[in-house]
Amino acid sequence: MKFTLSWLKDHLETDATLEQIAEALTAVGLEVEGIEDPAAKYAPFKVAYVESAARHPDADRLQVLRVKTENESLQVVCGAPNARADMKGIFAPVGAIIPGLENMELKKGVIRGVESCGMMASERELELSDEHKGIIEVDAKWDIGTPMAEVFGLNDPVIEINVTPNRADCTGVRGIARDLAAAGLGTLKNIDDSAVHGHTKSPISVSIEDTAGCPQFLGRYIKGVKNAPSPDWLQRRLKAIGMNPKSALVDITNYVSYDLGRPLHVFDVSKLSGNITVRAAKDGEKFTALDEEEYTLKDGMTLVCDEKAVHAIGGVMGGLHSGCSLDTTDVFLEIAYFDPARIARTGRDTGIVSDARYRFERGVDPAFLPAATEIATRMILDLCGGEASEVVHAGTEPSWQRMIDYDPAYCEKLTGIAVDDKEQTRILESLGFAIAGIGDKWEVQPPSWRGDVDGKADIVEEVARIVGYDKLPATSVTKPFAITQPAETTARTRARQARAALAARGMNECVTWSFMREDWAEMFGANDYQAAKTLKIKNPISAELSQMRPTPLPNLIEAAGRCAARGYPESALFEVGPAFHTAKPDGQVLIAAGVRKGAKGPRHWSGAEASRPADAFDAKADALAALETAGAPAANLQVTRDAPDWYHPGRSGALRLGKNVLAQFGEIHPALLEEMGVKGPVVGFEIFLDNIPETRKSGKARKLLDLSSFQPVNRDFAFIVDEAIEAGDLIRAASAADKKLIAAIEVFDVYQGKGVDEGKKSVALNVTLQPVDATLTEDDIDGVSKKIIDAVAAKTGGVLRG
């Protein structure tokens, strides 16, 4: 929302400075986003006097001017046909930035052999208008050196504020002035809304069929208007807020909308056929709006029509056919109230963004229609002349009155700010609230323009924001000498730990939508959780975001696909966030999911291992690292082959503690990737953080680092085992041989072929022995080796390869 300082002072009697006003606006909740001072933009440009004008010696269409500025007399070459001696214009000195010439810096130049030290500017060059036939001429009353901003009234600062969606009253300058007056920055001026005498009856009547979409409609016929360009003051204000003036009638409607937060519309009567009817749209109707776009209408939209055609989408935009032009002589003024929910839905369906929609969907003042009619009528008569008819009415004023029981002591209870009853009364009444009652039993009626105030907490907010949140006392909320409790829950701790572990493995964190396409949700297990019906979004913002996600994995796969499509084929992405399995309170689970696509590391001339494609084992390593950091007993986890269907059946697995599934990982099924339009392979994992078992109290702290001072010993073993034996079974069997000495076991080779019987395979293990008490002797090493061989033979049937 933009407005100028002088515009604000039309409604607010104040001596406050611009800085004080800006500070007060932010304090009352109307955050100032910026202040633009146009005078600074035009500071170099000043009034100058043309002392003489002579023809250029080498160009018929150029003149050489002698221009007197406030400090010196300069020579300027000028091609404007209206340049002449004894005139005053706007001079741009060397070094000035010319806004109408793409912010070009003006330099001293030589034009056809004659030096030119500056320029006399045109309106287009200074972005005052599109006029470029000649240079600007100013009245002789202006002294040489007068700033251009002063001459053209451009020394009016423009303030831009952020209006929150609940503050529909502050979509007009008057509502903003009312807040500042309540905050003590001045006095709200009275506004003339007295009745304009209607000379005749209106030849156009109004009826409402769609009373749900338009409860009330007021109209007025005004004949004999003269539509011409608006006066300078009106044009300057509209330009200051970024609007292009059109004509007086159109500019008045725009001005009232920004001035009072009251959208209205004027129809050219010569383009209407009969009386006005407000009705609901018929599905498929066509309508051409003022933006010259044709829209296909839907059931439920509210239309303003005559006996032959649609002339406006009520509360959104008028029609092109019945819009006013400079030839308009008779108009019909519309001041109506439209249902906010209906306008919001219509605006979304049509995609039309207009000032009227912005205000109506937030809820304009339902009681302001009669006063707005008189104000707009008076402005039209003042600027365009004409004769007004009596006001025609249709419908009734929407019900807005409500009483709220309020105890003034509740303000301190809720905010900690002690405000006495008299001050609360002053604040509320200055904001338009009506107060009845005594003592601690007040009945407060919000004004018609404050539809957002529903309860006593809202009344406290009104008092607190005007008093100032900076008045909140600094009060400790902790007891002295109390033992602090951890602020993190177990779930948050696990999420933080998993996030740190995955980031440390070179993965990039993502935050994706909690929604996804319905067909993708079904592919990734929504039906398994019976969520296909219960977790569909009734009013999705997009067809591709129509169901709550059963897992973050598809969103990450899609993100990796987008990265590849944009030239980044290697992706390592993860997200820690909720998944939704049912609509019950326990149906939301916390998942850490991740994907890798492309090479695991950058290519290297040496063919280093880092440049290989990511595979299921990388996903398994990611999952184990996150589980271990989050407190899961990673060393005790069993790997099973029962990963869900969205993983490749032969390149995936699950990490379990008994029946408790802590994670699942593997290569994403190629058929799913094809369905999603993502080129594979892609590997991924899902960690169910809620399934990690609680550790004992004594085991929560990380163990102290205990490094042995003795040299570790590595021994390799190759076992011949059945082809069906899992490598993990071998590792567990070997680890159990001597838990005190065996520090680590890794598989470094799997072989099938010549020298190994069919149905068998050779699995090679590297075992690290870490002595704790003394250096290992050969006998110690041989003893442990025999235990390993015997344990593997007993539990897997494996024999040492010869």
Image (cartoon, rainbow, N blue to C red):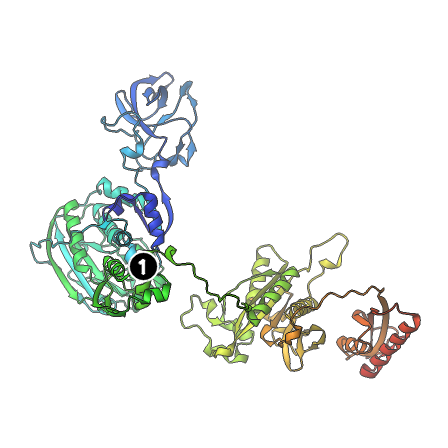
Vertical relation: 707 (above or below) 658: above
Farthest residue in the top direction?
57
In this rendering, would 338 be left or right of 610?
left
Q: Residue at x 46, y 65 (%)?
A: 477
Q: Compare residues 473 and 2 and report the one nearer the observer.
A: 473
- Could you tell me if residue 423 is visible in this image? yes
Which residue in the structure is indicated by mark 1? Answer: 167
In this rendering, would 448 be left or right of 751?
left
- Could you tell me if residue 298 is visible in this image? no
Amino acid bearing label 1: Arg
Q: Position of residue 172 (x, y in %)?
A: 27, 53
Q: Residue at x 23, y 40 (%)?
A: 232
Q: Residue at x 41, y 37 (%)?
A: 102
Q: Residue at x 17, y 45 (%)?
A: 383
Picture quadrant of residue 405: bottom left
In this rendering, would 681 be left or right of 352?
right
Give the quarter of the figure containing the C terminus: bottom right
Picture quadrant of residue 400: bottom left
Q: Position of residue 365 (x, y in %)?
A: 24, 61
Q: Which SS class for mark 1?
A: loop
Vertical relation: 634 (above or below) 600: below
Q: Position of residue 125 (x, y in %)?
A: 35, 34
